[in-house]
Amino acid sequence: MAETYICAACGGTFATKWSDEEAAAESREVFGVDPDTDPTMAIVCDDCYKAITTAFPPKEWLDRPC
C-alpha cells in the first residue's frame, strides 16, 4: 500500500510521490531550509504548493531582510 500524507494547507489526503530525502533536498534547494532542523516546515500538496509559491515566491522569501 502506498504511503499517504495530509496537506497542512487544505487538509486533503494524498499519495506520497517523493522520498523524504527528495523532499528534504528540494526544501534546501528552493527555500534554503533543512526540514530536519526546522520544526515549522510543513508538507503541502502540489496545488497548495503552487498557490503558496505564487503568492510568496521563494526567491523573494530568501531575499527578504530579517
Image: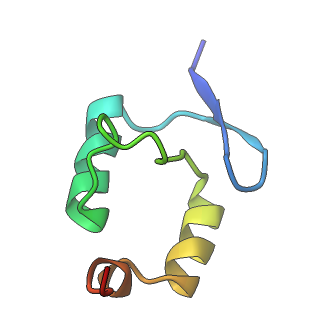
Asked if residue 65 is positioned above or below residue 50 in the image, the reply reads below
Taking 14 as reference, is 62 left or right? left
At horizontal 55% and vertical 64% (from top left) the residue drawn is 49
Q: Residue at x 61, y 52 (%)?
A: 45
Residue 13 place in picture, x, y as percent: 74, 37
Q: Residue at 64% of width from left, 64% of height from top?
A: 48
Q: Nearer the viewer, residue 2 or 11?
A: 11
| Quadrant where the image shows the C terminus | bottom left
> Would residue 35 appear left or right of 40 to someone viewing this image?
left
Q: Position of residue 5 (x, y in %)?
A: 62, 32
* Res 37 → quadrant: top left
The reply, left or right, for residue 10 in relation to residue 19 is right
Residue 2 lies, in percent from the top left, at 57, 20
Image: 19 above or below 65: above
Looking at this view, name the residue that lies furthest to the front: 66
State the image coordinates of residue 27 (x, y, percent, origin top left).
31, 54
